[in-house]
Every structure is written in C-alpha cells, then in structure tokens.
Amino acid sequence: MTQQLERKLKNRHIQLIAIGGAIGTGLFLGSGKAIHLAGPSILFAYLIIGVALFFVMRSLGELLLSNTAYTSFTDFAVEYLGPWAGFVTGWTYWFCWIMTAMADITAVGKYIQFWFNVPQWLPAFLCLIVLTLLNLLTVKMFGEIEFWFAIIKVITIIALILLGLIMIIVGFKTDTGHASIQNLWSYGGLFPHGINGFFLGFQMAVFSFVGIELVGVTAAETADPEKNIPRAINSLPIRVLLFYIGALFVILCIIPWTQLNADNSPFVKVFTLVGIPAAAGIINFVVLTSAASACNSGLFSTSRMLFSLGRVGNAPKSFSVLGKSAVPSTALMSSTLALSVGVILNYFLPDIVFTLVTSISAICFIWVWGVILVAHIIYLKKRPDLSRASKFKAPFAPFINWVILAFFIFLLILIGMAADTRVALFVTPVWFLILAIAYLLHRKKKADI
C-alpha cells in the first residue's frame, strides 16, 4: 500500500472546491437574517470579511508553496509555532468541520421533508453513507462531487443576478413596488439600524465564509500546486464580488429589505416574484445540494486532518494508513462515526444544537485563520530566504496580518453581543481546555517512551 496521498485533484476541481468553500447555506439561508439585522449595510459587512479572508488565503498560499511537502496548515503550524500549535490547530479544525457537518447532515434530512414525508434521520443517514462510500473510492471522486455541487450553486446565483439585473433595468413591478437601485436607501438609508445593526450583521456574514480555507487541506492532493493553488486563491475577490455582493445587491434592489423574512431565503422570494411556480422547490434543491456539499467537504477535510495528525504522532497511527485507493479510510470512517452522532443530537435538540454548533464552529475557524496569519508572520521573520524566493508573496505582510488579527478579535466581541451566539464564547473555551489537557498528557506519554 502506498503511504503518500496522490495528487489527483486537477485545476477544475481546485477552482470549484474554492468556489464551493465560499458559497454555503449561510448565503442561501443565513443572508435573510443578516439582512434583517443590518439592512442594506450587510453588503459592506460581506465585503470587509471577504477582503480580510483574501489576505488570510494569500498568507496560506505563500506558506503552502514554501514547502510542497506540507499536507495541510498544521504542518507549518508545527514548524513556526511549535508542536502544541499543530496538535491544537489540527484537532480544532477537525472539531470545526465535525460540528459544521453535524448541522448540515441534519439539514439534508429537513430539506428532503419538503418533498417527502419521511423521518428526518433517514435521508440524513442515507446521505452520510453515500458520501462516505464515494469518498472511499478515490480523492478524484471527492473532487468530482464537489465540482458538480459547486456548479449547481454557481448556476443558481448567476441566474439570480442576470434575472435581477433585467428586472432592475426594466423597472419590473412587484407586489412590493418597482425594482430599482433606490430601494437600497429608500427605507431608512443604507444603515437603517445604525452602527449596532451593521456590526450585528457581521455575525451571520462570517458564518457564510466558513470553509474558505479548504484549499489548504487539498495541498497534498493537488496536481501542479504551484500553478493551481495561486489561481484558486487569486480568484477569491471575484467570487466575493460576484456571489455575495452581486447576489445580495440584486436582491436588495428588487425587494425592499423591510419585506424580507429573517427566517426564509431571499433567493426564493426573488424567483417567486417573477412567477416561477416551482421557485421554492428549485431553491430547496439548491440548498439541499449545498448542505450535502458542506457535509462532503467535512468528510474530506476531517479525514485528511486525522491523516496529518496520525502521520506526525498526534493521533493514532492507524489514521495515517492509506487504503488501496490512496484514501485514509480509517480516518474517514472515524469521521463518519463522529458525524453520525450529530444526527442523533439534532434529533433530540434540533433548534438549540444548530445555533450552538455553528457559533462554536465559527469561533474555532477564527482560531484556525488566526494561526495561519501568526505562522506567516513568524515565517517572514525566521525564513527571509524563502520569502525572498517566493513566487506567491502575500501582499502588505506582515502589517496586514496584524490588522486582520485585530479584526478577528473584534469579530469575537461581536459574537458575544448577541444572546443567541453569546453562549458559544463560554462553551468554546471548554474545548480548548480539553485540548490543553490532552496535549500535556500526550507530551508526557512521548517523553516516557
């Protein structure tokens, strides 16, 4: 058996994985609540977060390409921050995706109930099994699945934008008035809820970008990484402008923000206004594939993270064993088992668990993004030779790294401002305490050997 991950992900896979990582249920469903909190100013919130994460991704890209032997960001975390950072960040990233995928796999069950009256756990369980079996085949299969899932999301958003622009140009009349750019400021201005409402909108907006760093986990399985990774990262600004700013701009021009329901998808509302009877069904299908895509990404990223942890001795060695298809099957099955617990948890606590796990996940992802920035700062200081030779330098570093780290601290404060997400700030430290104890025991065990 080969013990090296194979570079089977082609450019089209990497590009669509990057796009899929930037488009999730947060945009299709969460944008309704975000608009409710911030009004039209939510456009600026998405733009600011998108710009910040672009610089995170550029730091990630430079670090990954400084040593193509890196399999994920835990490798350079160990090199530049120390063994503890690799241990804590690796397990935290695994935990992030397990928590996120728990919510998504349960969402699949809920979305299927739109068409079929079946128990929620059944389609969730079947989806998990199918995705696991497909991921066990080859890494190329994961790439193909994500490619087509992302295509569905991209087509939906482009269709919305094109349809919306036509409605705005012709001044299409709806039951809420005429489609017009003036709708952006005619209902209380761009900041109808003031600066507080604008800040609260950041909470939901940041959830939408979770998974954007997935390109960093595909590094060891990317064909021609020196070419394909920079291409995927550099297209991030275009993706943010088109899929987030573009889509929400069109929605807010067509429908006054005051007419949007915080609990419903604004995408459904737009398609319904133009007289498409199956609008709700179409968007439900898109959101279903988006949830399945997130779960698919969760299975891939958690299995590769366990592989990396096992390879360096931070997890059982069995996780670093590859099957005949060069897939870490033991790590994959372990993640599947952990995800199956999510179906049970969400069955008993559907409302509480979803908000809690997504909030905890966002905080943990901010940790991961922060580790990338700090590792890059240390890399610039310790390895100026590699930095000078880099063909993919992160712009404005290290100054911009410090600015974004301060911004991340600001985001954590914002999460603590809302009652429904504040509890995550109290729960998340428990995870890091558990990890700290686990690392001390792990280090003691290695010292005794």
Image (cartoon, helix red, strand yellow):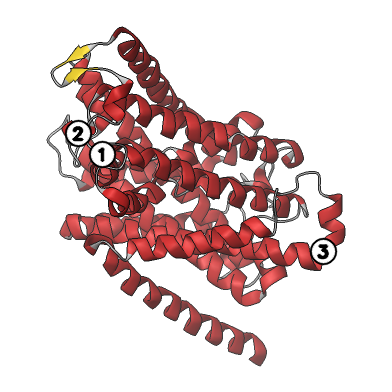
Q: CA distance from mark 1 to mark 2?
A: 7 Å
Provide the secondary structure element on which disc 1 rests: helix
Which residue lies at the image location 49% right of the left edge and 59% below the top edge?
Answer: 407
User: Which residue bears the numbered disc 1?
Assistant: 32
Image check: 78 left or right of 117?
A: right
- Callouts 1 and 2 close, C-beta under 8 Å: yes
Q: CA distance from mark 1 to mark 3?
A: 45 Å
For this rendering, which residue is in front, 324 or 406?
Answer: 406
Q: Quadrant of the C terminus?
A: bottom right
Q: Position of residue 36 (x, y in %)?
A: 23, 42
User: Which residue bears the numbered disc 2?
Assistant: 260
Disc with the residue nearer the chain's start (1 vs 2): 1
Disc with the residue nearer the chain's start (3 vs 2): 2
Disc with the residue nearer the chain's start (1 vs 3): 1
Q: Position of residue 176 (x, y in %)?
A: 15, 22
Residue furthest to the top in view is 170
Image check: 1 left or right of 388?
A: left
Provide the secondary structure element on which disc 2 rests: loop
Which residue lies at the image location 50% right of the left edge and 81% below the top edge?
Answer: 436
Amino acid identity at mark 3:
Arg
Q: Position of residue 360 (x, y in %)?
A: 36, 63
Q: CA distance from mark 3 to mark 2?
A: 51 Å
Crowding near the residue tagged with mark 3, few <14, some 14–19, many ≥20 C-alpha atoms within 10 Å: few
